[in-house]
Image: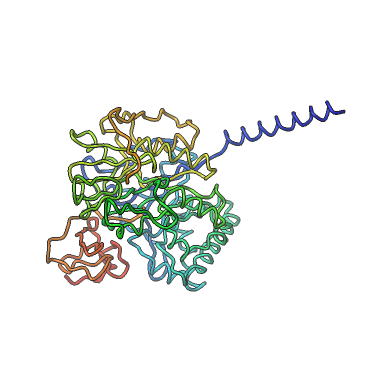
Amino acid sequence: MFEHAQFCRIIAVWVLIVTVAEHLVEAEYMRGCYFTNWARYRTGRCKFSLDTYQPGMCTHVFYAFAKFNYDFEAEPTDPEDLPSSYYIGTYATVTNLKKIDPDLKISLSFGGYSFGGYLFGLMASTETNRQKFISSAIEFARRYKFDGIDIDWEYPSANEKQLYVLFIKELRDAVEAESESTKQPRLLVTAAVPAGKATIDTGYDVAALAPYMDYFLVMTYDYHGSWNSYTGNNSPLFARENQTDKTFCDVSSFNAAIFTQLRVEYLQAWTMNYYASLGAPKNQLIMGFPNYGRGWMLRNRQENYVGAPANGPSPAYPCTQTAGIAAYLEICEVLAKPGVQDLFNEEQEVPYFINGDEWMSYDDVESVRIKAEWARNEGFGGGFVWTLDFDDFNGQCPGNSHPYPLTRTMGSVFSNGQLPSPVPTVAPSTSRPTVPAVTATTVAPPQTSSTAAPGVFTCPGDGLYADPTNCNRFYQCTFGQSYLLSCPPGLHFSPLYKVCDFAGNVSCKV
């Protein structure tokens, strides 16, 4: 009898092991890929085309951005999104990807940083307004053959916290009812959500949202940027050794006062686990991977560590055309130049480079692999990139033998290495030193930008402001620094909505 019972226990354990192993092998992770409708307006090396897309690389594509008006009707942000006599429209170009990648799910993303939160709040404030937008968004998504609706509301206020829950609940109820009545597959309901604890706590009742959300797309990046007066990692995975629950500082090296924001929660691992602790199932939580870096100009070349004092943003690059930010396709070209120091912070699992006075935090194949493996091993639902058009999508950088090195590396981890074609191998240089401990949108940018000339425009505060001399242009103000930006051709900047809009929708008398 004892032997029989022991045998049964062995069999039971064996079955459990096999079942778990099968589950791990068969687990499906999201490989999400955002790209933007303004990327096609770039020129030369920077111009993005979906011709570079590789079938199987992504499980979900999110096309950014659409918007809605004061009647809460869904609209494109770019007239080229819609079909015309000379072009099938970018919506059709995007959804045609399913012809070469039949399992791909494509969602239309509404909102974005530039769209702001005001109109979202107005829409969510009454049931009538919510139903107007929900009905319009569903019809709009179906008309242009999308598979889901992605909400990028940046960000609900404390007064809008429960309104946001009502909105997402009613959206989920509506897509289920629409699916039942039309016998079509249900539209996905997803949302881009913030990484910062204060913003999460203010506007997101995570446990209440979870039953109605297919996925939370957690924007685990922009933890540091040129708004800080010190260098920091854009998307650190883990804490530095001397980070604590409150702050860290090295008073022997620099002024501790500027480090009050280098908190332990400014980390990808912390953010993901915090959402889980608030009630989101881990398989609904999708970790964000930035295909771009953030940079500063060092105050002193001799002080070039993580957390070193800085004098504002690094210069604008040709593709991103925004000071303090660079796409990976730009960064990988800089790394090939002589004299550039390419370093890796082993504590936080991220690289950075130093090029003279310039200090740039970014992600590479190595850091993406480490982060994706961590997210997979922790049981999270996958990853997404912001954005495809920031990756080396043509594979033109030295050492990149395949297009999309970052996106494909993430995809390889979340597909158990089963992407249709080999992931490019971009080994880090053997001369690249590791750095020991040293003693803390997504925004929809327009087509062009430059730093405003002194005296031309005075920022009344952070935000977006119309150029009083040109309907097509506007200023982005960040910590008193103004940057002159231009809308895509044919569009005017709307001071009301803070977005580029059709000229007929904007009152501009310049």
Look at the picture and state if 21 lies above or below 385: above
In the figure, 397 relative to 118: above or below?
above
State the quadrant of the N terminus: top right
- Residue 101 falls in image quadrant: top left
Q: Nearer the viewer, residue 99 or 174?
A: 174
Residue at 26% from the left image edge and 33% from the top image edge: 396
Establish if 265 lies above or below 44: below
Q: Residue furthest front?
A: 252
Residue 273 seen in the figure: yes
The structure's colour scheme is: rainbow
Q: In the image, is residue 329 above or below residue 275?
A: above
Q: What residue is at 54 percent from the left and 39 percent from the top?
A: 28
Task: For the C terminus, give its image quadrant.
Answer: bottom left
Res. 419 image quadrant: top left
Indicate the position of residue 278 as horizontal and vertical percent values: 54, 57
| Whole-percent x, y for residue 500 in the image | 28, 61
In depth, the one of 484 and 224 nearer the eye is 224
In which image quadrant can residue 340 be found?
A: top left
Task: Please indicate whether residue 172 sits to the left or right of residue 390 in the image.
Answer: right
Q: Is residue 131 visible?
A: no
Count of marks, rendered view: 0
Q: Residue 283 placed where, x, y %?
A: 55, 47
x and y percentages locating residue 164 in the rendered image: 49, 65
Name the residue rendered at 32%, 38% in the picture. Answer: 435
